[in-house]
Image: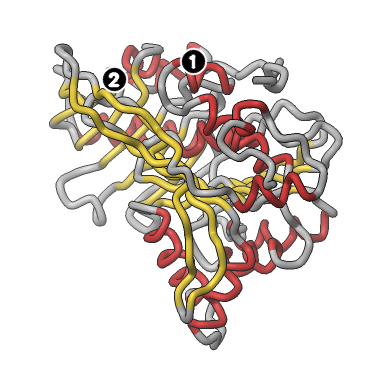
Amino acid sequence: MAVSEKSTMVRPQLDPEFLEILGPIAPLVSRPDISEVMVMGDRDVYIEVNGVVELTDIKFASEPDLVKTIEAIVHSVGRDIGPDQPLCDARLPDGSRVHVAVRPVAVDGPMLTIRKFVEGPDQPETMVRIGTASLEVMAYMRLAVEAKANIVITGGTAVGKTTLLNVVSGFIPEGERIVTIEDAAELHLHQRHVGRLETMTATTGGRNPVSIRDLVITSLRMRPDRIVVGECRGSEALDMMQAMNTGHDGSLTTIHANSPRDALSRIENMVLMAGYDIPVKAIRGQMAAAFDVFIHLDRMRDGSRRIVQVVEITGMEGDVVSMQDLFRFEFRGFDENGMVLGRIAPTQVRSRVVDEARATGVPIPPELLKLYPPPR
């Protein structure tokens, strides 16, 4: 399977001075095998390693010490935190995400979560090798991107949605103009013509916030060939959907959801959040017209992340958006080490995206020709 060139972008590292302000958790943040550090007041510090959460023996000496560390982190990236503004999301220089909650919203003491940027599987072959996807699924995703299908990646927290979005975005042809929109800029596309937009929170000094919806609206004035939204979770769903229905084909986003069907319900609710009096049937009709493919990820009991479902939208049946499974994960049990056995397998249902790609002259990868031969 042909793949994109590996990105030559050099990812910044946290400098020693910044690590110093982290106090007792600095060694955890420095460890490459740790993907998340979760501080629960001055009582406990948890880490995630290989998908498994563990309690460490590290603690802050006192709550004031923890507050001092939190303030130093937040101020270092130009944000504010305190009783009047007790929540903060920020991005560290190395791409790691930080979320902070302090009193009064954090009832039992300040909570600090650092989701580290971890060099994950940023190449298609790597995702196949570690079992996240199969050759057929990866070939299908490449074809869907080249055919300018609108793709939604779904799944729960920390299942690898952003990692997969990075890989799938790598299939966008080099000559296209791409605008990425994120709360915290994590996507690192290898293409040259990429404009990166990031939200901005309000500050006590009076700075106005800039939301995902603001950025989606402004991106439409930038003449993008593709819009890539890191996560769609609010009223911006309406603008994203309208963009997909008015010539911005090939857009990509992720949505926090338990299944592709659940994602459709979430999108419907998000559109209603925009405040317009739109009939539900009209929203569903727009969804059926806008979205083409849903790719669902799950985290298994052994900590591995797998693509477990690939779904195509096929239209409307009455008041319901209809969909069909192209690939579904077949669970076969566990091996002697407790690792999940199974594979993502084709359902033998004919692909609408493949047929449309074939009709418009998009080359069909050999991995898909066996599954979807030309109609006789």
The local secondary structure at tag 1 comes to helix
Residue 20 in the image: state x and y as whole percent: 41, 16
Q: Which residue corresponds to the image point at 40% horizontal and 40% vertical from the top-left?
A: 297
Residue 142 in the image: state x and y as whole percent: 65, 34
Residue 169 picture quarter: top right
Residue 230 in the image: state x and y as whole percent: 56, 45
Hey, which residue is sitting farthest front in the picture? Answer: 376
One can see residue 296 in this view: yes
Residue type highlighted by circle 1: Glu
Q: Is residue 366 left or right of residue 137?
A: right
Residue 225, numbered circle: none
Q: Find disc 1 in the rendering and name its residue.
A: 17
Q: Find disc 2 in the rendering and name its residue.
A: 49
Residue type highlighted by circle 2: Val
**Residue closest to the eye, 103 or 361:** 361
Q: Which residue corresponds to the image point at 23% horizontal and 28% vertical from the top-left?
A: 332
Q: Is residue 365 left or right of residue 230?
A: right
| Circle 1 residues within 10 Å: few <14, some 14–19, many ≥20 | few
Q: Is residue 147 left or right of residue 186?
A: right
Q: Which residue corresponds to the image point at 42% horizontal and 17% vertical from the top-left?
A: 130
State which tag comes first along the sequence, 1 or 2: 1
Q: Is residue 235 above or below residue 308?
A: below
**Residue closest to the eye, 108 or 317:** 317
The local secondary structure at tag 2 comes to strand
Q: Is disc 1 in contact with disc 2, using a CB cutoff of under 8 Å? A: no
